[in-house]
Image (cartoon, grey):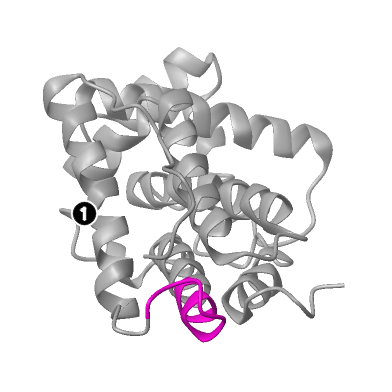
C-alpha cells in the first residue's frame, strides 16, 4: 500500500505504529478512559504552559484546572518535563498521520511540497498555544533534542527532503537546486511563522503559488 510513498514517510509510519514507546509512563495498551484522561491532562497542560511558561507552571496548577487529583498526573507522566515533551510528541504523531493521508496518492513533487507546508500552517493556526511552548520552552531545553518528539519533528523535515529529491529526479525541480538548502529554506520559513505568532501576534496567510519548475 505504501510502496510509492517516500521512504521517510514509511519510516515515520513504522514509528507511529507504536505511539506509546516514548518516555512517558503510558507505554502499553491503555483503556479508553485512561486515554481520555491523558488527553485532558495534555490539553490543560498546553494551556497552562503557554500562559505561564515552563518554569512558572506547577503540576498542582495543571491538576486544579483539569479538576483532577494532582497525584493522578503521575500515573501518566514521570514529571513536569516528561509532560512538557509529551505535548509535541502527541501532536506530531497526529500531524504526521494526517500528512500521510493527504500525501497518499499524490504523484507530482510541487503539489506534494505545498501540502505539508499548508498542513503545518493550518495546524498552528488551530493550535495557537503550540508555537509559544515550542519556541520559549522546548527549544531552550537541552534535553529536548534527545526526545522522541524531536525525532518526530525531524521526520517531517526528512519527508520534505524526500519530496524535493524525488522532484529533482523526475525533472519537476531544477537540477541545480540543492535539496538540503531548499529544505532548510522551507523549514526556516516555518520558524519565521513561529516568531510572528509568538512575538508579534501575526499569522501569515498560507499560500502556494502556481505550478512551475523551481
Q: At 41% from the left edge and 43% from the top edge, which residue is drawn? A: 209
Residue 87: in sight, yes or no?
Answer: yes
Q: Nearer the viewer, residue 15 or 208?
A: 208
Q: Which residue is mark 1?
A: 139
Q: Nearer the viewer, residue 149 or 9?
A: 9
Q: Is residue 200 magenta?
A: no
Q: Nearer the viewer, residue 121 or 212?
A: 212
Q: Range of the magenta residues?
A: 164-174
Circle 1 SS class: loop
Q: At 49% from the left edge and 52% from the top edge, which residue is drawn? A: 211
Q: Is residue 152 left or right of residue 93?
A: left
Q: Nearer the viewer, residue 60 or 57?
A: 57
Q: In the image, residue 104 lies at what x, y percent?
A: 74, 59
Above or below, 95 relative to 167: above
Residue closest to the far right = 1
Above or below, 26 relative to 213: above
Amino acid at each position: 500500500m505504501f510502496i510509492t510513498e517516500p521512504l521517510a514517510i514509511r519510516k515515520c509510519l513504522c514509528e507511529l505504529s507504536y505511539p506509546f514507546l516514548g518516555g512517558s509512563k503510558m507505554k502499553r495498551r491503555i483503556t479508553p478512559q485512561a486515554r481520555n484522561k491523558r488527553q485532558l491532562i495534555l490539553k490543560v497542560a498546553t494551556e497552562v504552559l503557554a500562559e505561564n511558561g515552563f518554569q512558572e507552571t506547577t503540576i498542582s496548577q495543571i491538576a486544579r484546572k483539569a479538576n483532577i487529583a494532582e497525584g493522578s498526573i503521575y500515573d501518566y507522566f514521570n514529571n513536569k518535563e516528561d509532560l512538557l515533551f509529551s505535548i509535541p510528541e502527541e501532536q506530531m504523531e497526529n500531524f504526521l498521520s494526517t500528512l500521510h493521508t493527504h500525501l497518499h496518492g499524490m504523484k507530482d513533487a510541487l503539489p506534494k511540497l505545498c501540502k505539508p507546508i499548508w498542513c503545518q500552517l493550518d495546524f498552528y493556526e488551530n493550535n495557537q498555544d503550540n508555537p509559544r511552548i515550542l519556541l520559549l520552552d522546548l527549544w531552550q531545553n537541552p534535553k529536548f533534542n534527545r526526545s522522541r518528539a524531536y525525532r518526530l519533528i525531524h521526520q517531517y523535515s526528512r519527508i520534505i527532503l524526500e519530496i524535493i529529491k524525488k522532484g529533482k529526479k523526475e525533472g519537476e525541480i531544477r537540477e541545480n537546486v540543492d535539496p538540503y538548502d531548499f529544505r532548510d529554506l522551507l523549514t526556516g520559513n516555518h520558524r519565521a511563522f513561529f516568531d510572528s505568532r509568538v512575538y508579534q501576534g501575526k499569522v501569515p496567510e498560507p499560500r502556494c503559488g502556481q505550478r512551475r519548475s523551481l
